[in-house]
Image: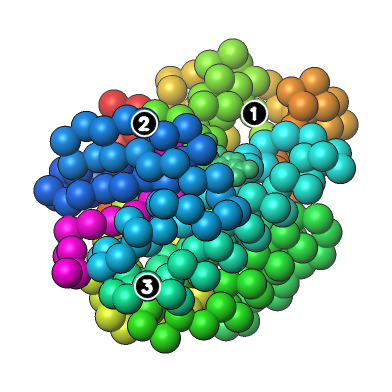
């Protein structure tokens, strides 16, 4: 029987998964997380084992589910050495491929399959906004991951299931994700502009992230690629200024490009995460009628820091 109540979240143990779990449990829905660390059952929430690449018992959970929201993927917040690069590709491609196989073979396939992707697929853009129709695809390792991830998702045929791909911007929330490093920099007085400060930051409030997923599930005409970012990306200089105001921090030492590169080396991550200009806009979401709760970074941060 189709369970209009059941949402499956592969990779739901991470930051975005936790946002969705809270949201959907709050709506009285049943949530099944597919995780390499299973075991927990709590009311309407259940963690079921999968390894992110092979068929297993977990497959039966997808029968008759309302939606699958795939968030599985090794974090990109790391050094891009060969071992990490392979894990970044494999975790995204293998999980997407095996979900496709299972959904294609379901007797009662889920109504909708929403797969994570990333707004970093677009080129470094300071000159003009990038949207689904006129945006230009970039180059380099991260873009290549996104291209292969999307190509695989797009080529999978699941006739009984609607497919939606979300090109996600950085999601800011109260309990984790990218908010943590930004908050720490600002609190320690290091929240000045990063690099030239002219690179754009695309962002999304966690409430909008959850509402967008809910909208995608309910809106039967939502198919294909959606940029999931607030409509107002802003330059890094303004973005950091908004952060300092939100945390009432008067001091914000700027970081030149070499300082960013040195800092991220010490933190064992990559400068691209900070210095690449992501000027991404959600043209399709706006055109198709999604109403954002947070369109201004100042209001979003005021909400997240209260
Ligand atoms: N958060 C953002 O701002 C943002 C922005 C753009 C794109 N995205 C994309 O959205 C997705 C979810 O983001 P998130 O912030 O929630 O990430 P996260 O906190 O790192 O969680 C991702 C989950 O993926 C699973 N995972 C990790 N390595 C895996 C592997 N090798 N094989 C299978 N599963 C693996 C883990 O679950 P288990 O350990 O339980 O198996 C983990 O909890 C990611 O693909 C990310 O790239 C996120």
Which residue is at a point 26% across and 68% down the rendered structure image? 64
Q: Which residue is mark 3?
A: 106
Q: Which mark is residue 295?
A: none
Q: Quadrant of the N terminus?
A: bottom left
Q: Nearer the viewer, mark 2 or mark 1?
A: 2
Q: Judge the density around disc 1: few (<14), some (14-19), many (≥20) Cα neighbours within 10 Å.
A: many
Q: Secondary structure at mark 3?
A: loop
Q: Nearer the viewer, mark 3 or mark 1?
A: 3
Q: Secondary structure at mark 1?
A: loop
Q: Which residue is mark 2?
A: 39
Q: Judge the density around disc 2: few (<14), some (14-19), many (≥20) Cα neighbours within 10 Å.
A: few
Which residue is at a point 56% across and 29% down the rendered structure image? 182
Which residue is at a point 67% across and 42% down the rendered structure image? 76
Q: Quadrant of the C terminus?
A: top left
Q: Which residue is mark 1?
A: 192
Q: Is residue 257 left or right of residue 76?
A: right
Residue 152: quarter of image:
bottom right
Can residue 125 be seen here? The reply is: no
Inter-mark Cα distance, 2 to 3: 24 Å
- Give residue 135's position: percent from left, percent from top: 64, 75
Position of residue 147 relative to residue 186, above or below, is below
Please give the range of residues in magenta.
1-17
Q: Nearer the viewer, residue 176 or 271?
A: 176
Q: Nearer the viewer, residue 61 or 240?
A: 61
């Amino acid at each position: 029987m189709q369970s209009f109540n059941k949402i499956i979240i592969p990779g739901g143990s991470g930051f975005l998964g936790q946002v969705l779990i809270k949201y959907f449990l709050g709506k009285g829905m049943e949530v099944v997380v597919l995780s390499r660390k299973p075991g927990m059952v709590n009311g309407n929430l259940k963690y079921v084992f999968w390894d992110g690449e092979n068929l297993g018992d977990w497959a039966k959970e997808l029968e008759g589910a309302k939606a699958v929201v795939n968030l599985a993927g090794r974090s990109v917040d790391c050094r891009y050495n060969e071992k990490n690069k392979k894990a970044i590709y494999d975790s995204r491609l293998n999980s997407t491929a095996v979900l496709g196989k299972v959904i294609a073979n379901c007797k009662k396939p889920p109504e909708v399959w929403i797969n994570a992707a990333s707004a970093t697929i677009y080129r470094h853009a300071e000159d003009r906004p990038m949207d689904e129709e006129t945006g230009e695809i970039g180059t380099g390792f991260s873009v290549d991951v996104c291209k292969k991830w999307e190509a695989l998702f797009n080529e999978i045929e699941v006739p009984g299931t609607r497919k939606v791909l979300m090109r996600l911007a950085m999601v800011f929330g109260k309990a984790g994700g990218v908010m943590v490093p930004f908050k720490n920099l600002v609190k320690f007085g290091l929240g000045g502009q990063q690099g030239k400060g002219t690179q754009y930051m695309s962002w999304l409030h966690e409430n909008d992230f959850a509402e967008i997923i809910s909208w995608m599930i309910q809106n039967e005409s939502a198919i294909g690629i959606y940029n999931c970012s607030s409509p107002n990306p802003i330059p890094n200089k303004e973005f950091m200024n908004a952060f300092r105001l939100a945390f009432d921090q008067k001091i914000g030492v700027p970081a030149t490009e070499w300082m960013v590169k040195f800092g991220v080396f010490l933190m064992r991550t990559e400068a691209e995460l900070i210095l690449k200009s992501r000027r991404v806009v959600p043209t399709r979401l706006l055109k198709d009628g999604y109403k954002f709760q947070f369109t201004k970074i100042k209001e979003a941060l005021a909400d997240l820091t209260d």
